[in-house]
Image (cartoon, helix red, strand yellow):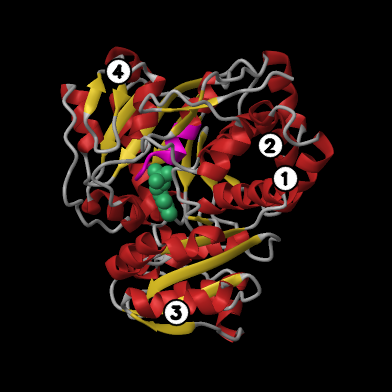
């Protein structure tokens, strides 16, 4: 099988295969890894997807990116293990749907990417007889998704740092009730303190033998797995020759970038609606052709999308022939006309977000939380401006029970707590308290691993 190589969006000449790019994370020139060639899935094969389940579709989507790095039977086992939860597609009205990506272990769509990345890392590390320590600082949700995704994997230890007083009880319990290879530290400080301690550990020569990694969100091993659910959605609801519209609530644009890749792989997509909250740097760019990051980012109720400069925009620019560095500087303009044909960009205010939660529930009996509501509001705006289009799928990226205050405020109803979330309240917690300075953290880390 032909091997796809990965290069940096900043133009570094070194090419790596999937395994190399996955274990490296970020390119040495601070660019993001992108596949040198996007594999096509034939129409015949696409037509067969409607008879396949999620892991079977995942195999067809992932296989070309991996080439012969993993024998098929091993990859099948990995996919069955990673994707063992449902992916409901709910009809809202006519051929308008909401796909719920919130049924994984941390009730957020980040489970789709993190679980497969963790398992692929474990596979390659074992193959090489290596091990790795993942360090991650979190203000809440990222840490729990990473901790859950890597929980109980071999050859990988996870250390999560969170600001003791700044995460909710449930967020904390999603991390502290795991144990085994997951080590959790509550830091007497702020998120920024956690982040800077992690950064210092990465450059500390005393830890150079530990093989520290951040497993962060720009890893190409987290990007590609997110293409799978776009194929899945299409296969469940569209006739084989029918193009679909997706609306994607977006922050760092990893989710929508994976959708754009799916389209290049042959998935029949009419348009992507990129729906952001009040951080409207991208919709301004689509209007004016002038890109200006928003610093600092605007605080909105869809707080996982409070991003003033999406890191994956460098990949989006690359896809359309442009180049953007990690700071948001445009080196070469992309083909903006082509972008406008394929993408409809919209910025949604908090007021519109709340109204979308209320409308979806009162008119259609569909319960959304703020992120999914931004997607739904974006789709509604799109359908008003253009001639109607069907089918359409709006992505719901978190369980409403994660944002009870906003849901109660919009619809006067307490969102039902999923059983697995409620169970957390009865599990034993285990974590260490750490002072907010590097010496204390280094002491803890040394005790664990040196
Ligand atoms: C991370 C996140 C997003 C944003 O996804 P991107 O890939 O960064 O655009 C949206 N919704 C929720 C609930 C998230 O956690």
Disc nearer the start of the sequence (4/3): 4
Quadrant holding the C terminus: bottom right
Q: Where, by quadrant of the figure, is residue 225 drawn? A: top right
Q: In 3D space, how far apart are the residues under numbered discs 1 and 4 (Cα atoms)? A: 35 Å
Q: Position of residue 348 (x, y in %)?
A: 25, 44
Rendered image quadrant of residue 294: top left
* Visible residue check, residue 43: yes
Residue at image location 75% in from the left, 29% down from the top: 68
Disc nearer the start of the sequence (3/2): 2
Q: Nearer the viewer, mark 3 or mark 1?
A: 3
Q: Any magenta on residue 255?
A: yes
Disc with the residue nearer the chain's start (2 vs 1):
2
Residue count near mark 4 (Cα–Cα under 10 Å), binned few <14, some 14–19, many ≥20: some
Q: Quadrant of residue 27?
A: top left
Mark 1 element type: helix
- Residue found at x 28% / y 73%: 190
Q: Mark 3 touching mark 2, by CB under 8 A? A: no
The Cα atoms of the two marked residues, 3 and 1, are separated by 38 Å
Give percent across and percent down for residue 422: 57, 77
Q: Could you tell me which secondary element the residue under label 4 belongs to?
A: loop
Q: CA distance from mark 4 to mark 3?
A: 48 Å
* Magenta extent: 250-258
Q: Secondary structure at mark 3?
A: helix
| Residue 79, disc | 1
**In the drawing, does residue 42 fall left or right of residue 338?**
right
Residue behind mark 4:
334
Q: Residue 58: give its label.
A: 2
* Residue 221 shows in the view: no
Q: Is residue 56 left or right of residue 169?
A: right
Of mark 2 and mark 4, the one earlier in the sequence is: 2
């Amino acid at each position: 099988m032909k091997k796809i190589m990965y290069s940096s969006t900043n133009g570094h000449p070194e090419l790596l295969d999937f395994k190399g790019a996955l274990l490296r994370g970020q390119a040495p020139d601070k660019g993001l890894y992108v596949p040198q060639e996007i594999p096509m899935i034939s129409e015949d094969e696409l037509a067969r997807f409607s008879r396949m389940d999620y892991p079977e579709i995942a195999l067809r989507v992932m296989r070309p990116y991996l080439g012969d790095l993993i024998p098929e039977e091993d990859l099948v086992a990995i996919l069955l293990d990673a994707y063992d939860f449902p992916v409901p597609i709910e009809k809202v009205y006519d051929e308008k749907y909401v796909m719920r990506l919130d049924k994984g272990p941390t009730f957020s769509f980040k489970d789709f990417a993190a679980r497969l990345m963790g398992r692929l890392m474990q596979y390659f590390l074992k193959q090489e007889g290596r091990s790795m320590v993942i360090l991650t600082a979190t203000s809440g949700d990222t840490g729990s998704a990473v901790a859950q995704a890597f929980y109980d994997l071999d050859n990988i230890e996870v250390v999560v740092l969170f600001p003791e007083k700044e995460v909710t009880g449930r967020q904390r319990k999603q991390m502290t009730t795991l144990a085994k290879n997951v080590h959790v530290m509550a830091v007497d400080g702020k998120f920024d303190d956690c982040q800077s301690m992690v950064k210092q550990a990465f450059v500390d020569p005393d830890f150079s033998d530990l093989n520290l990694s951040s497993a962060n969100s720009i890893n190409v091993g987290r990007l590609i797995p997110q293409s799978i659910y776009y194929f899945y959605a299409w296969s469940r609801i569209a006739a084989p020759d029918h193009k679909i519209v997706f609306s994607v609530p977006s922050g760092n644009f990893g989710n929508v970038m994976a959708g754009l890749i799916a389209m290049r792989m042959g998935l029949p997509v009419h348009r992507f609606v990129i729906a952001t909250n009040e951080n409207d740097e991208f919709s301004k760019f689509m209007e004016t052709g002038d890109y200006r990051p928003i610093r600092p980012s605007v605080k909105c109720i869809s707080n996982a999308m409070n991003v003033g400069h999406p890191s994956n925009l460098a990949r989006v620019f690359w896809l359309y022939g442009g180049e953007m560095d990690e700071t948001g500087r445009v080196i070469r303009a992309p083909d903006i006309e082509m972008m406008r044909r394929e993408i409809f960009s919209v910025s949604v205010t908090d007021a519109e977000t709340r109204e979308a939660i209320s409308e979806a529930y009162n008119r259609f009996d569909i319960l959304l939380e703020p992120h999914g509501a931004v997607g739904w509001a974006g789709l509604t705006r799109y359908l008003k401006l253009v001639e109607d289009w069907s089918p359409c799928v709006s992505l719901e990226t978190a369980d409403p029970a994660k944002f009870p205050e906003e849901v109660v405020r919009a619809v006067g109803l307490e969102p039902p707590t999923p059983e697995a979330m409620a169970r957390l309240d009865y599990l034993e917690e285990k974590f260490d308290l750490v002072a907010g300075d590097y010496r204390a953290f280094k002491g803890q880390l040394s005790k664990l691993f040196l």
